[in-house]
């Protein structure tokens, strides 16, 4: 293989849309009698394979419209419609004229002969497939854009003396040329590109023929399709192409991501992405389609429908079957039979889909019944019951649906591979990287989760022959924040392939446009999924030049600036929840980034399209500036005063204007403040003063912030001087009062309404305060906080009243974050009725930074639970009325030195006027010695 570049490729920075031709000119059909409306739909002049064909077709359409108008009676709606559609021809002709004016003048020489309509022809099969037809037309459209001239299309049997450019399966022409291509061995996606003298052969099946055409255009003619809106086709230059003998079968059969910019059908086929989220149609080769995508246990058996009658179908946890947030009991034979039937029905009703996911719900709570536990224990992993279960389903469907796969996850509690079980050949295991550090290549990171992942992938590779990966290229908490993973992307793809991986789904920021460097990240992974030898710097540089034009250089400097700290420090990690206080986002770096973007905006100031792209790339920097400058407060008397020195109002306005123009609608996934509007409102602290209500006795001092959801921000234990509540500060030591502390919600979800709505002080007495907030949902939240006269004891009584006219769902969730000196020495102490108190250490394994644990029904405290913190020299005692409480959540973080003892009221549907209440106390008691089991 030899590639001769005759001269430098000029990538046009002007980026336009290049829609693929829709109308096959290979077999001109006799004109059908179309209606005026149907003719109108064919007018878009940019979609013809060539300008010549466009002119021809517009002429035909005009004649047909004229005939329709003449046939219709004067002033009839039909005549008026024909005339209205005729009026659209003028702008279409103008668009075509513009297209013609934009054509390039490149010379493409194959074997020394320049492509020329007088000497060459594109040869297509006598009976082309939809894909061959589309490939030939789009090839010709690009040849015209490159050279200014289109080629005639000729059927295989009709080739005369022209030099053939063969597209697809043309046996007669190939015989004449004495060229043999083994297309069988290429599968659905492999490509072959051959030259023989001045002739060119592009071969492949289904998607392969399209990929052969696009590889030819990309690798040998310099074309790039950066995004659906930005394509770069060289306009000048000479391409000398000779002695090609390319054969490539992509190592990954499934190549997928889900950024909004990756779904366009033309973009996807040209960049060889074939995932289920793309809009690929048959003409563009189709795609690998999931019938059911993920977390399907509830679709197989919904506990809401079946638990009452068959609790044994669902997870048994600590001796009790669980209905909420449950999984399936995978060793129950009836569950298996139901699952087999369900999967068969899925397959029957989605004939085009080839993968069906039978996978755990998106939480833990696996079944611990005797049979499930025995199998899992024997295999050393909870993946054992899962694999045995999906294997049985796969054996059941194998004969009737041989082309369909069963998919399951190796995710969280099922990530460790079983010791001896083998995976059926028609089962696809999707191994998930969710816990890992993404700043460094998975196999090079020092993070323990990455090191475990390397062991897991090696294990799974031995057990199954179809291993896919669900990888994460997103910060869910801050999807508009610099997240330096670009240099890990391609090494990870190589690492996956080296470990037998056949399919890759890169979960990206799918829920909004405008997330951080979405288009660039999409580009890098698309290039490398097709060809893992693609170079990261090449991908970045060509993209920046094509997409940002003259702003490429400062944006490159910005990317380097963000990546330099992680490339230098193997211990600097990023995760799916990394926050803007990450060390690589320090003030110096952000100031430098900001001035680089000033430079970038200046470079493209005259071009509104490029300027907008640059501004979208700048959003992450603005985001960090806003978030890091708006939260810091200082205590001044009975007020918390915003410490921001800059006017964030200006930054916010700027952020909002760019975000709205781009269509950015979410800041983070599924979050109360994920929505752009809510986020803008929540960070508008600029110049704010938050009044403090204080309650104090000799042993405790409380600081309450009515304007921030009535949260208790401080609870200082006077004898020790320690704050019982977890408090957060920024790097300068300013208070971050909207994190930590004691907060409450009106629904079960974290930070659902109630957490930060301003409260009115209804009543204030020496030892108590009554607060009230009217929530948008129609609920009214009332909270009475009372401090005991002497003891370090606080009573919190909350009520949610339905002030609306419709019934409303409500759940009072109390969310206290307690500060703990040392999680490794602390313990949870829970008195259990009729049994010994449950005492358990709170220490977490080194590789688990944070953990959520819902206490099992049998472990629910009978009205009391405590944290013993030996280093603090007190216990935190929380008491409540079990009759009011539905769930208790223990959440803890070693990194934050924090333990939450959260209470959920029993969820209720409140009729108008009805009230839901929760009363509990928090008390600091002298420490007692707690003996932990095994100590
Ligand atoms: Zn079970």
Image: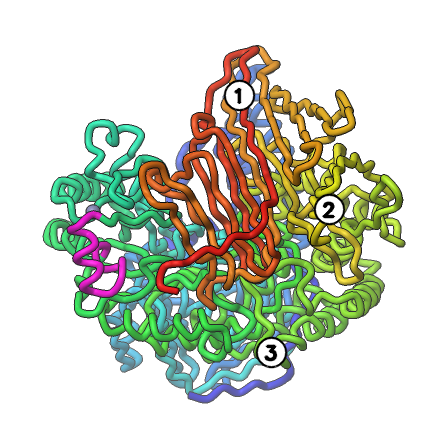
- Where does the magenta region start and end? 369-386
Task: Report the residue marked by disc 2.
Answer: 737
Can you give x and y, in whole percent of width and height, for residue 127 in the image? 28, 57
Predominant SS along the magenta part: helix
* Circle nearer the N terminus (1, 3): 3
Asked whether 828 or 484 is in front, the reply is: 828
Which dot marks residue 70?
none
Query: Local crowd at mark 1 within 10 Å, few (<14), some, or many (≥20)?
Result: many
Which residue does the image show at 36% across and 72% down from the upper left? 250
How far separated are the C-alphas under marks 2 and 3?
Answer: 42 Å
How far separated are the C-alphas under marks 1 and 3?
Answer: 59 Å
Q: In which quarter of the image is the N terminus?
A: bottom left
Task: Report the residue marked by disc 3.
Answer: 537
Asked if the residue under mark 3 is in contact with the one under mark 1, i.e. CB atoms within 8 Å, the reply is: no
Residue 196 against residue 723 in the figure, above or below = below
| Number of the front mark, 1 or 3 | 1
| Number of the front mark, 2 or 3 | 2
């Amino acid at each position: 293989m030899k590639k001769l570049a005759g001269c430098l490729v000029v990538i046009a920075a002007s980026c336009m849309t290049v829609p693929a031709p829709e109308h096959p000119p290979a077999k001109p059909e006799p004109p059908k009698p179309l209606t005026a409306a149907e003719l109108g739909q064919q007018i878009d002049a940019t979609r013809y394979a060539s300008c010549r064909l466009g002119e021809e077709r517009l002429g035909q359409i005009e004649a047909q419209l004229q005939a329709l108008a003449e046939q219709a009676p004067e002033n009839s709606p039909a005549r008026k419609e024909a005339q209205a559609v005729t009026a659209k021809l003028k702008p279409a002709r103008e668009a075509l004229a513009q297209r013609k004016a934009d054509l390039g003048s490149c010379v493409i020489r194959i074997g020394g002969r320049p492509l020329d309509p007088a000497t060459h022809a594109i040869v297509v099969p006598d009976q082309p497939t939809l894909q061959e037809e589309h490939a030939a037309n789009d090839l010709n459209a690009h040849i015209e854009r490159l050279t200014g001239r289109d080629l005639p299309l000729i059927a295989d049997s009709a080739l005369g003396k022209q030099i053939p450019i063969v597209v697809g399966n043309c046996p007669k022409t190939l015989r004449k040329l004495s060229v043999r291509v083994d297309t069988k061995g290429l599968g659905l996606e492999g490509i072959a590109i051959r030259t023989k003298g001045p002739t060119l052969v592009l071969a492949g099946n289904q998607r392969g023929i399209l990929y052969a055409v696009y590889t030819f255009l990309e690798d040998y003619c310099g074309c790039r399709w950066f995004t659906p809106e930005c394509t770069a086709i060289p306009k000048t230059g000479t391409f000398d192409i000779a002695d090609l003998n390319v054969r490539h079968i992509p190592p990954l059969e499934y190549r997928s991501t889900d950024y909004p910019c990756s779904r366009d059908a033309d973009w996807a086929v040209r960049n060889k992405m074939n995932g289920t989220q793309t809009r690929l149609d048959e003409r563009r080769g189709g795609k690998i389609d999931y019938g059911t995508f993920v977390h399907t246990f509830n679709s197989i058996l919904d506990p809401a429908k079946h638990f009452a009658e068959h609790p044994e179908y669902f997870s048994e946890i600590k001796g009790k079957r669980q209905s909420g947030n449950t999984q399936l009991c995978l060793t129950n034979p009836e569950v298996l039979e139901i699952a087999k039937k369900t999967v068969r029905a899925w397959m029957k009703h989605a004939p085009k889909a080839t993968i069906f996911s039978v996978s755990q719900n998106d939480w833990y709570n696996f079944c611990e019944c005797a049979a499930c536990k025995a199998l899992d224990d024997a295999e050393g992993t909870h993946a054992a019951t899962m694999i045995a279960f999906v294997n049985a389903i796969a054996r059941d469907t194998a004969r009737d649906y041989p082309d369909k796969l069963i998919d399951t996850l190796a995710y969280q509690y099922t990530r460790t591979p079983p010791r001896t079980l083998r995976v059926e050949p028609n089962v696809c295991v999707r191994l998930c990287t969710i816990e890992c550090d993404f700043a460094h290549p998975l196999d090079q990171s020092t993070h323990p989760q990455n090191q475990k992942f390397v062991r897991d992938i090696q294990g799974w590779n031995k057990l199954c022959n179809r291993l896919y990966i669900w990888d994460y290229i997103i910060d869910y908490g801050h999807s508009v924040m610099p997240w330096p993973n670009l240099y890990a992307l391609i090494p990870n793809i190589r690492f996956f392939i080296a470990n037998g991986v056949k399919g890759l789904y890169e979960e990206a920021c799918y829920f909004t446009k405008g997330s951080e460097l979405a288009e660039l990240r999409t580009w890098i992974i698309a290039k490398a999924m097709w060809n893992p030898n693609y170079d990261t710097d090449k991908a970045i540089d060509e993209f920046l030049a094509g997409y940002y034009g003259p702003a490429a250089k400062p944006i490159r400097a910005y990317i380097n600036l963000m990546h330099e700290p992680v490339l230098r420090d193997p211990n600097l990690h990023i995760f799916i929840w990394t926050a803007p206080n990450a060390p690589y986002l320090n003030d110096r770096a952000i100031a430098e980034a900001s001035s680089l973007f000033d430079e970038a905006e200046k470079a493209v100031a005259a071009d509104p399209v490029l300027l907008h792209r640059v501004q979208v790339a700048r959003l992450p920097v603005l985001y960090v500036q806003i978030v890091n400058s708006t939260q810091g407060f200082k205590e001044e008397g009975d007020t918390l005063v915003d410490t921001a020195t800059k006017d964030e109002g200006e930054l916010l306005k700027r952020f909002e204007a760019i975000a709205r123009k781009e269509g950015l609608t979410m800041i983070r996934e599924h979050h109360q403040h994920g929505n752009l509007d809510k986020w803008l409102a929540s960070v508008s602290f600029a110049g704010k003063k938050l009044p403090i209500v204080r309650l104090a006795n000799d042993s405790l001092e409380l600081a309450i912030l009515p304007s921030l959801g009535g949260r208790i921000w401080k609870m200082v234990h006077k004898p020790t001087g320690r704050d019982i509540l977890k408090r957060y500060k920024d790097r300068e030591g300013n208070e971050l009062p909207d994190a930590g502390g004691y907060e409450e919600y009106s629904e079960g979800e974290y930070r659902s309404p109630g957490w930060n709505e301003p409260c009115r002080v209804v009543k204030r007495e020496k030892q108590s305060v009554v607060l009230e907030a009217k929530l948008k949902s129609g609920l009214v939240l009332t909270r009475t906080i009372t401090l005991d006269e002497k003891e370090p004891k606080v009573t919190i009584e909350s009520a949610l009243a339905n002030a609306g006219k419709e019934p409303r769902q409500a759940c009072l969730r109390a969310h206290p974050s307690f500060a703990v000196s040392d999680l490794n020495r602390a313990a949870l102490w829970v008195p259990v009725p009729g049994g010994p108190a449950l005492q358990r250490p709170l220490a977490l394994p080194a590789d688990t930074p944070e953990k959520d644990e819902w206490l099992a029904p049998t472990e629910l405290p009978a009205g009391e639970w405590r944290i013993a913190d030996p280093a603090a020299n007190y216990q935190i005692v929380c008491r409540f009325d079990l009759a009011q409480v539905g769930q208790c959540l223990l959440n803890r973080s070693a990194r934050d030195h924090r333990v939450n003892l959260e209470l959920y009221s029993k969820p209720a549907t409140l009729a108008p006027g009805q009230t839901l209440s929760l009363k509990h106390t928090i008390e600091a008691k002298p420490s007692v010695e707690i003996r932990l089991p095994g100590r």
